[in-house]
Image: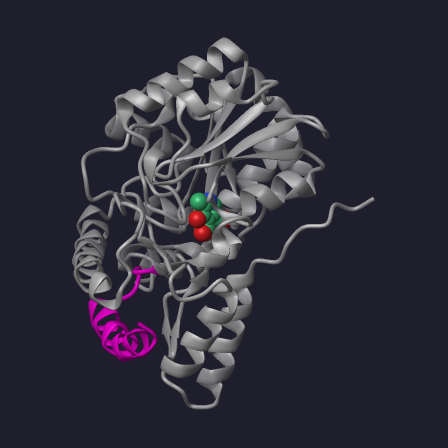
Amino acid sequence: MAAVIDPFRAISISRIAHALKAEGRSIIHMEFGQPSTGAPPAAIAEAHRVLDVDGMGYWESPALKARIARLYDERYGVQVSPERILLTNGASPALVLALSSRFSPGDRIAIARPSYVAYRNTVKALHMTPVEIACGPDEHYQLTAAALTAVDPAPAGVIIASPANPTGSIIPPEELAAIVAVCRQRDIVIVSDEIYHGLTYVGRTPSVLEFDPDAFVINSFSKYWSMAGWRLGWLLMPENHIEQARAYMGNLFLTPPSLSQHAGLIAMDQHEVLEGHIEVYRTNRALMLDALPALGLKSIAPPDGAFYIWADIGHLTDDSLAFCEQLLRDTGVATAPGVDFDPVEGHRFMRFSFAVSTAEVEDALSRIKPWFAARA
Ligand SMILES: Cc1ncc(COP(=O)(O)O)c(C=O)c1O
């Protein structure tokens, strides 16, 4: 029987936002973690160029795999062979590949609660069982070694994400090392979603590979490289699992778009443009952190990285979906309801994405201020 999974409710908010826009309303999109900046100009220029010279067949770019391998050396001082990298159509298929090729139906997979909506639902869709571990302020909204030790019996796998969606929280390096030690001891396979790497505002985010060369690592061009719709990402795994994962990739997805691979290779060297995006996010984050307490949103997760604010709205509602919809209809500001990320507590949380322009953040704040004031 097909597994029943929940919808991604931010999509329904977005649908309403687009319908309101079609009616002529001014909408600010803070519901998705989607950079509003677009691909770096040099990557777009490369896409234009190759359209005339490449037939765009099925393809896995050896140059891109080599460049990604170099990224691990540059960012983390970790040497990986390009052969351990599988190019995918984004992080979402990479997660499907990691789970389906490494685990079996019925396996228990630990995840944080709150966490990215697709972890729970992809695990379920593949007939595995999510083991959700509540992570609140005391745990920095992140999985800990102690929490993983307490799961009995040990799960087959764990999905970690640092920086995380929806909170932006980061697992400190010493805690990550402790998590790896527990997983090694208890034979738990780590799947690390590193899609928000490069987007940090406090300190440095280590890769799990610095501690565990056998982890499965997911990454994507959707966030740091600002290329969400190009559908390009990768899965990095231990050598003895490559052939199986490659078989799954070939059968389920074939290859990611050739055009995106050409453009992605160029994007990886556009440091100035990409660091410019981070400066915008840093400004946006500061504006939000400054303004939200005055709206009564005093309890928020530490946004160490990514581009989200996860805010407690329990004093205002116990229905985050209805709350976000009303906020959108009244102010034109689209946000994500907490129920997507946390089925237990999420009815009293909401998520703002600040991956928009600074002018849009300022506009959004000025629109929502009176709205929240009226409810205080
Ligand atoms: C934590 C996390 N992982 C994976 C994804 C999916 O990314 P992709 O666009 O690469 O499929 C997202 C998208 O928002 C995300 O937030």
Figure check: 332 above or below 74: below
Magenta stretch: helix, strand or loop mostly: helix
Q: Is residue 88 left or right of residue 122?
A: left
Residue visible at 41% across and 18% down?
180
Residue visible at 19% across and 40% down?
202
The residue lying furthest to the bottom in this view is 24
Is residue 54 visible in the rendered image? The answer is no
Q: Tell me which segment is drawn in magenta.
A: 353-376
Which quadrant of the structure image shows residue 331?
Answer: bottom left
Q: Position of residue 329 (x, y in %)?
A: 44, 81
Figure check: 26 above or below 226: below
Figure check: 152 above or below 163: above
Which image quadrant: the N terminus?
top right
Which quadrant of the structure image shows residue 41?
Answer: bottom left
**The stretch drawn in magenta includes residue 198:** no
The residue lying furthest to the top in this view is 185
Residue visible at 21% across and 46% down?
271
Which color scheme is applied?
one colour
Q: Is residue 244 left or right of residue 349?
A: right
Q: Position of residue 313 (x, y in %)?
A: 38, 61
Q: Position of residue 349 (x, y in %)?
A: 42, 57
